[in-house]
Amino acid sequence: MPSRQPSHIVGLDNGGTANKFTVMSSTGEFLIDDLIELPSRVTEGPAAALDALELAFEAALSTAGIARGDVVAVGFDSPGPASADGVLSSRGATNFAHRDWWGFDYRSALEERLGLPVVYSNDTNAAALYAHHRHFGAVAGERSSAAAIVGTGLGGGVIHEGRTVKGAAGMAGELGHVHIPTDGLLADDQPLPRCNCGFVGDAESFASLTGIRNNLLPYWLTRYPDHDLHAVDIGEAATQVRGYGERGDEMALKIFEQQAMAIGRLFTIISNVVDPDVYFIGGGVLEAAPHFRQWFLASVREHTLLRAEQAAIAEVLEVTDLDMAGCRGAAVAARSVVSHR
């Protein structure tokens, strides 16, 4: 009797604090429905992080009820910056500050550890790819999309005909670092916001938790001298702004109005470069009460200025299943590579 060929793909999403995982069958079905998180241990350096990823891999197998011999490849994503082949920046990164991470070939190290082919994706590229395939289904290979994922920073991804646009150095889709016009976006006396990357006035300097903490909240607190958040540490205050926005607080709504306007202007730029079928938004800004989420999406749509021909086709939509989008998108990326071998 012939032996069964391995056909399953394990997806591993490596984050700053947690690893998430999934398993995709040969038919594209995800075999794990529930979000399960295990410590990522990335702050302890590569050796500990690889131990943690191997544990996540084994947990994926046991949860899905499959054997190691059933796995043909692993899809793996991590935060950037990194090359298209999974070599981390020689300068380190927010989640990879340990000196041993600088210039570390993460993909190859995981491949050696697991003894299986590993396909690497940037984490936000993976989330964008999953959003694309989930939305378009059978016609994903005929459509294009762009995604902005609002978190600590502003990640992104561009998908063309069902595949991630990576670019020559693997840094395509870094939508957070696109400069946007600020005329009419900033208040009269509001300084140009600065991004941690060194740019001034890019999308992330507005639309991110870091942008709120470093730029938007400090300014708007000067305009609202009696606001409750004056009594709170600026870092903690930044995380509380969304809750105030949900409750209709005037200052918080001005902050999120600027974020929505910035994302709309970013999408306007993208419309003239990529002209996608769908613009996706995801991240913490949408993990909110339904009325606030709908208001924010409507504000982004209002400030996304499309030509009449584009507006008749394109949509601005929310990324769903975001907690599982990274590992599932990593699996989708790996499946695409395996199927083309």
Image (cartoon, rainbow, N blue to C red):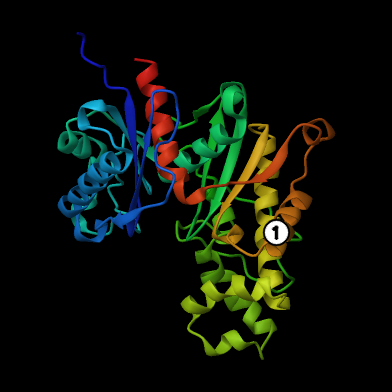
Farthest residue to the right: give it. 308
- Can the viewer see residue 146 in this picture? yes
Residue 23: percent from the left, percent from the top?
36, 36
Neighbor class of circle 1 (other Cα within 10 Å; few <14, some 14-19, many 20+) is many
Residue 294 lies, with reference to residue 174, above or below; the image says below
Farthest residue to the top: give it. 1
Residue 86: percent from the left, percent from the top?
31, 38
Residue in the image at 64% along x and 33% along y: 273
- Can the viewer see residue 169 in this picture? no
- Residue 218 placement, left or right of 100: right
Residue 340 lies, with reference to residue 18, above or below; the image says above
Quarter of the figure with residue 135:
top right
- Residue 244 placement, left or right of 338: right
Judging depth in this view, the residue of 200 and 131 nearest the camera is 131
Location of the N terminus (image quadrant): top left
Quarter of the figure with residue 60:
top left
Judging depth in this view, the residue of 203 and 28 nearest the camera is 28
- Residue 49 placement, left or right of 154: left
Judging by the rendered image, the residue that carries numbered circle 1 is 296
Location of the C terminus (image quadrant): top left
Residue 204 lies, with reference to residue 89, above or below; the image says below
Judging from the image, what secondary structure is the residue with disc 1 in?
helix
